[in-house]
Amino acid sequence: MAHTRQHLFVFLGVMFISFSSIFIRMAEAPSLIIAFYRLLFTVLLLLPLFLREGISELKTLNRNLIVLSTMSGVFLALHFYAFMASLKYTSVTSSTVLVTIHPIFVGLGSFYFLKEKMSSGFVKAVFITLIGGIVISISDAGQGNSALFGDVLAFLGALLMTLYMLIGRVARQKISVTTYTFWVYLSSTITLFVINLIVKKPFYPYAMKEWILFLAMAFVCTVLGHNVLNWALKFLNPTFISTAILGEPVFATFWAMLFFSEFPGMFQLIGSSIVIFGLLMLIKKTEQPKI
């Protein structure tokens, strides 16, 4: 079958990404510190590739592109913090599903800010997805304010991811993926470094387990996960990649059951299924002619 190798790598990439919530839950360091070291180690891992392929391009970029890429990095940093913080309060299932709804906001942002046309079924997809999110939130509200606060943080993480992606859509038209990715991660790292200094979070000491988890998030989730999906875009339909990414909450829920004995409730499963159905509808409609 054509592209069998690429399909396998996409499957593995999504699986590696799904470990992110598990590693975060295992870590005991503050969320801001977890986010900082994940991105710092990612920058260090990508540095050789950037020095070989991207540094010459960076020197030729105009100020506007650098500013846009830096802004994208700031929003990515805040996204990671919100997502990681949410896992301290709510379940792995709720957090990963609510963060995954960002394509809905990207579609809305593209319509209002980038003046892109909506597909005919977009509004229906938004409505269905939001209903699923409400079902999840109502379910978590019954578990106390802590879980609901975690849902709010996950929702905020989706909004911040939207800003990161919308800005990136503009910047990536004139920058290679290597240069853009490295600069965004570097900007994110610096942003989190400054925030940690301001709020006086300790950069050390941490147990060896924490350092292993920081490195695992960078290598497993980012390099073997997100970067593999970026590579696969050269060979596969973006719609297939977008659909495959919806497998992250499914994998993450399975790992949470395996490692933490954290089983989702009935309404969480119902709400999550509605959200994923709405996102699948959105992905399908974006391939149809615009109106």
Image: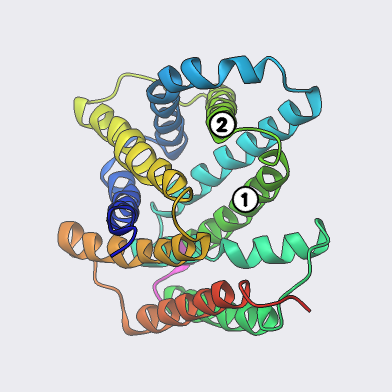
Q: Estimate the x, y position of residue 56 in percent, counting from the top left.
A: 61, 15
- Marks 2/1: CA distance? 13 Å
SS type, badge 1: helix
Where 278 sits versus 103, above or below?
below
In the image, residue 143 lies in the stretch drawn in magenta: yes
Where 165 sits versus 66, above or below?
below
Which residue is depicted at the point 47% across and 35% down? 32
* Residue 91 visible: no
Name the residue carrying label 1.
Answer: 160
In the image, residue 175 lies in the stretch drawn in magenta: no
The dot on residue 59 is: none
Kind of residue at disc 1? Leu
- Which image quadrant: the N terminus? bottom left
Circle 2/circle 1 CB separation < 8 Å: no
The residue lying toward the viewer, choosing from 60 and 45, is: 60
Dividing the picture into quadrants, the one containing residue 255 is: bottom left
Q: Which residues are magenta?
A: 142-149
User: With 12 as the anchor, is 233 left or right in this view?
Assistant: right
Which residue is depicted at the point 71% across and 83% down? 120
The residue lying toward the viewer, choosing from 33 and 201, is: 33
Name the residue carrying label 2.
Answer: 188
Identify the image's colour scheme: rainbow, by chain, secondary structure or one colour: rainbow
